[in-house]
Image (tube, helix red, strand yellow):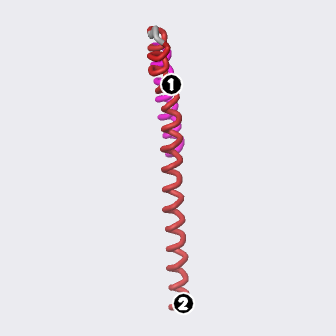
Amino acid sequence: MVSFTAFVVVLHFQTVAVGYAIMTARTAEDWKIRAFRVLPMFLLPALSSLTYSAIRSFVNMCKCQYLEMRHHVRYIQHVLS
């Protein structure tokens, strides 16, 4: 459910960025200004991909540590009983 919500939020921001890029690129006369105004359209997907990858790696790391700890506790319980 969280990944779906994140997907919807990213899709919304991407739509806003594309709309902003189209609206501002029409008024720009210099190619440098136009390129700068279109930049958010390319940065948002890159930043969202990096954020998603970092969060996914962190969650997997925490899950792995939890499973190792749980296995260790079960082993100790087995030895003590």
Callout 1 crowding tier (Cα within 10 Å): few <14, some 14–19, many ≥20: few
Q: Position of residue 21 (x, y in %)?
A: 48, 19
Q: Which residue is mark 1?
A: 15
Which residue sits at x=50%, y=50%?
A: 54
Q: Position of residue 13 (x, y in %)?
A: 46, 29
Q: What's under tag 2, amino acid-wise?
A: Val
Gap between marks 1 and 2, in whole Å? Answer: 58 Å
Which residue sits at x=48%, y=38%?
A: 47
Callout 2 crowding tier (Cα within 10 Å): few <14, some 14–19, many ≥20: few
Magenta segment boundaries in residue numbering:
1-23
Q: What's under tag 1, amino acid-wise?
A: Thr
Q: Secondary structure at mark 1?
A: helix
Earlier in the chain: of badge 1 and badge 2, it is 1
In depth, the one of 35 and 63 nearer the eye is 35
Instruction: Please check the rendered image and state whether residue 47 is part of the magenta-colored stretch, yes or no.
Output: no
Residue 79 marker: 2
Which residue sits at x=49%, y=20%?
A: 35
Q: Secondary structure at mark 2?
A: helix
Answer above or below: position of 12 versus 70: above
Q: Position of residue 6 (x, y in %)?
A: 49, 40
Instruction: State the predominant SS element of the stretch in magenta.
Output: helix
Answer above or below: position of 19 versus 1: above
Q: Position of residue 46 (x, y in %)?
A: 52, 36
